[in-house]
């Protein structure tokens, strides 16, 4: 095993990526559908797939990288086993979400966009979950959580670590 390779690169299935790319390569505007399919299959858009896409679509590698980096929904690394999405829209800001983000960083050394070192938890920012009446709001593994507090955050981080062992 090459020690410089990330876990995402080690688990990359080149044949599967090639199948996904070939399935849509003939379509007009195929780049975004291919990227979505890759993310669905691999839980991110693997860097190793970018040259394959560029070749199949007759695009430069820079063009493909530019699209992946422009759209924030395309992930460059896989998510943790659990995902906590914290709403940062206006209602949640008004109800103190920034203090919760600060608490997460100080108490757990996790910031928005991070995955815990053990791979148990990924923290993501989202902009409006539609739970404004229960601000600050979040989703933990797609389950809504309202009136999020520092103690609740601590419990979610603990729960993610315990259920991932």
Image (cartoon, helix red, strand yellow):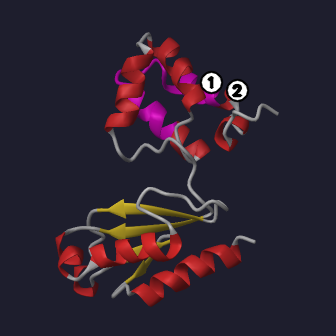
- Is 26 or 139 nearer to us in this picture? 139
Quadrant into which the N terminus falls: top right
User: Alpha-carbon distance for marks 2 and 1?
Assistant: 5 Å
Picture quadrant of residue 130: bottom left
Query: Does dot 1 land on a helix, a strand or a loop?
Result: helix
Q: Mark 2 points at which residue?
A: 15
Residue 121, x across and y down, in percent: 57, 65
Q: The magenta stretch spans which residues?
A: 17-37
User: In the picture provided, is 5 more to the left or to the right than 35?
Assistant: right
User: In the picture provided, is 93 more to the left or to the right than 165?
Assistant: left
Residue 107, x across and y down, in percent: 49, 77
Magenta span main SS: helix
Q: Mark 1 points at which residue?
A: 18
- Is 8 or 53 nearer to us in this picture? 8
Residue at the extreme front:
106
Q: Is residue 74 magenta?
A: no
At label 2, counting other C-alpha atoms closer than 10 Å, the crowd grade (few under 14, some 14-19, many 20 or more) is: few
Q: Do the residues labelled 2 and 1 touch (CB within 8 Å)?
A: yes
């Amino acid at each position: 095993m090459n020690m410089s390779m990330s876990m995402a690169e080690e688990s990359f299935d080149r044949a599967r990526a090639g199948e996904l790319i070939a399935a849509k390569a003939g379509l007009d505007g195929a780049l975004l559908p291919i990227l979505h399919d890759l993310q669905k299959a691999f839980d991110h858009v693997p860097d190793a797939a970018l040259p394959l896409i560029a070749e199949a679509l007759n695009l430069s590698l820079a063009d493909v990288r530019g699209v992946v980096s422009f759209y924030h929904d395309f992930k460059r690394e896989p998510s943790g086993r659990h995902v906590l999405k914290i709403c940062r829209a206006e209602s949640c800001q008004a109800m103190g979400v920034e203090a919760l983000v600060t608490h997460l960083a100080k108490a757990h050394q996790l910031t928005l966009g991070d995955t815990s070192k053990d791979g148990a938890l990924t923290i993501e920012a989202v902009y409006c979950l539609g739970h404004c009446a229960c601000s600050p709001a979040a989703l933990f593994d797609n389950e809504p959580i309202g009136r999020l507090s520092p103690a609740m955050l601590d419990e979610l981080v603990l729960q993610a670590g315990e259920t991932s062992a």
